[in-house]
Image (cartoon, grey):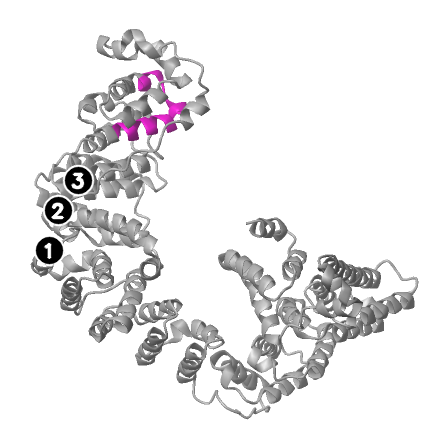
Amino acid sequence: MNTAAFKANDSKSQLEYIEDIENQLIDDDNDIVDATFCENCFKILPKYLQNDDKAVRQRSLKILEHIGTKDFQIPEDTTTVCYSIILCLTDQRENIKSQALRTLTSLLSVIPAGFFIQQFDQFNNNFSSEIRNELISYINEKIDTLTINDWKSCMLLIATAVEDKVENTKLIAQVFSKNQDFTDALQQAFASLPSSQQKLLHQYIDASGIEVDKSKSMISEIVETPEATIAINSSAFSRKSRNEQMSEEDGLKLIHDSTAFAPFLASLSNDVRDVFDDDISKLLLSTLYVDRLSALESLRTAFKPPKKFQYTIDIMLKWCGIQFLMRQVSCAQAALGLLLDNLQEGIKVSKVELTFIVPIVLWCIATKSDAYSDLLDALKFSSKNSDYAYALLKSISLEHSAIITIIFEELGKLDDLTSVESQLKDLSHNRLKIISEPAKQLLFSIAPKGVDGDGNIDTSDPIAALQAQIERIRSIPEFIRNQREIFSFLFSLYEDQPTDERLVRYLLYCTYAFLSEPTLISAIENQSLVALFNSMLNFSLDIDQKFSEPMNAIGFILVTVVPVFSLYQSLIMFIDKQPERITRQTFVYNVFMTANSLFCLDRVGADLMMLRDYVKDAITRYGDVPKEDLRPVLYKSLLTETVTLDQQRRMTSEFFKQNQSVDQRIVGKVAMEEEYEEPPEMTVNDKLIFVKIVDKIGTMATKQEGIQELIQFDQENKCNNGAINAVCKLAPMLRTELSQYLSK
């Protein structure tokens, strides 16, 4: 920005400098907004705001709104920028007034409200009723920061609003006039006010009896302003701003949720009026199909420079998407033709734009016409491979068999699916074969050669063998058929007690990967899992402490899948052999306490009493022990868990009995006992799902999603809050948050 920018007087030159500023702001990583940048903007843009050109005003206001979100030191002189923004509030074009209000709101976070209020008097007669509503609300929000001079500047606004022709505006002003802060300021300033204002406001000097907080809350909601109109006017910066307001769910909601249309159309109408000139805007938003067809013909000419279409593509995709879903075939065909003509080389569609339009196009292909397939090809051509794949998979939630078939056919045409490999793995476990089978085939197609099938293990180089197995497991675990051979290989390595750090690292990684896959671990017998657990207990005592995290992660899975009695039997026998080596930092202690926390989740079945007797016997065996011995802590904690679970079972059984009808009681005790059954043992797959949910909860980015999945998991598996209690024991800080979810 330079002197030439400040001296620019014509709209064309000013728009060039505006675009230069937008290009500097568009890069999120470019920390351009500093004191110098803001000072220059505050000098140049106020002059541009005084230009009556709609594009110049709207884009200048948008830049100032963006600057208001940044943390910077405001320039000493803000009078001109405040004046110019208040000037824009008197603009007859509704979208300019709406944008000026948004800019004012943004800048109020960095510029004191009084700086703006001092400009009210000179523009008061030009304010519309709706703007007066807004400004009184701003005064009310900033009331604690106003000086007596600020109050003097807004008295005329309030006096005028009191006599406004619009009843809502008059009511808002009358309610505000009962505010104690206002009456106090009025009493101080009354003598210095013009006689015309004194006449209007005299009645409020002695107003009292309404509490300040109450009067603030009585100010009603602002009447929604009419939609905007503006000349053809957009840029990369504007498009990016609109993209940030889009949701990935918008397109899906329009297909399934009829209530989504009204708010979506309201937002789209605003954007249309912001970008296109008044005549085209009216035609695009008309309810008459002939008007919309006329608008499309005009746009074919307007989009001759590709840049014009590129900067408005988000709006056109949304507008065309609406036409596709409506019943007017001629408009849908014309909209389809417009997109096909303009989605050419050099035009790029963003990820959020794709996730909006792709579900709608797929829906139209499946339910209306194959002609939309050409648009799908054009969208693929005009977008990133990863974004297109993501948008396709997002559309699976439509749960339409024809659409699902098209999705996987399209994915099969892509050269690179690595960006959605994790989603494909999740889909490969889907209960619907129409989803799981093609997902597996795609995984197979992108897997490195030689990772499928039996894949003989060459043990001459253990590290290379582990790397090969990790690659196989990560790629297509569903196609691995030598699960037992892999497991035996891992078990043999633990038995050898390796010390090489690199070998240990790959061994732990491969073990975790293997145990995390239901298709692999389900082929391993419980006896073999117990043997592996015993081997890991021995291995853990001499392993470097830096491997404790992956060891505990493996331990968590084993605690979840190994039968509970066998698990504790192995732990107690191991601890009794060498209690002096067990500390709170060891793998054994961590696994034991984790198992205790998860005890309320396990379906112990008939093993409960046997386990209770076993731990009682273990407690009597150790007798008097040193203070450092952790067996009393571990064993008594386990005994408490068994007693608690037994009591819970009895209470649940009693509850069922008490709630049986009189007729059921007559049947007899045996019949009643047969009616109450313990929930069935969880499958390995269900247990591993629980492990993944716990991982999600432990990651900040997926915590809320994990909590919701945990509650659903608890209900579907009839855990009676057992799964939730287990997680709360693992992470007590979550108990309050989970209670909030359960109370909803």
Q: Which residue is mark 3?
A: 57
Q: Nearer the viewer, mark 2 or mark 3?
A: 2
Q: Main secondary structure of the magenta part?
A: helix
Residue 729 image position (x, y, % from top left): 68, 57
Nearer the N terminus, badge 1 or badge 2? Answer: 2
Q: Which residue is mark 1?
A: 295
Please, which residue is most extreme toward the top here? Answer: 191
In the displayed structure, 567 sits above or below 485; it is: above
Amino acid type at image mark 2: Ala
| Element at label 1 | helix
Is residue 145 on the magenta stretch?
yes
Nearer the N terminus, badge 1 or badge 3? Answer: 3
User: How many angstroms separate mark 2 from mark 3 (CA)?
Assistant: 11 Å
Q: Nearer the viewer, mark 1 or mark 3?
A: 1
Residue nearest the viewer, comparing 466 with 594: 594
Q: Which residue is mark 2?
A: 231
Query: In the image, 736: left or right of 215?
Result: right
The answer to whether marks 1 and 3 mark residues whose Cβ atoms lie closer than 8 Å is no
Residue 349 image position (x, y, % from top left): 25, 64
Q: Residue at x 24, y 43 (%)?
A: 62
Nearer the N terminus, badge 2 or badge 3? Answer: 3
User: How many angstroms separate mark 1 from mark 2 (CA)?
Assistant: 14 Å
Residue 202 image position (x, y, % from top left): 31, 9
Residue 734 image position (x, y, % from top left): 61, 52
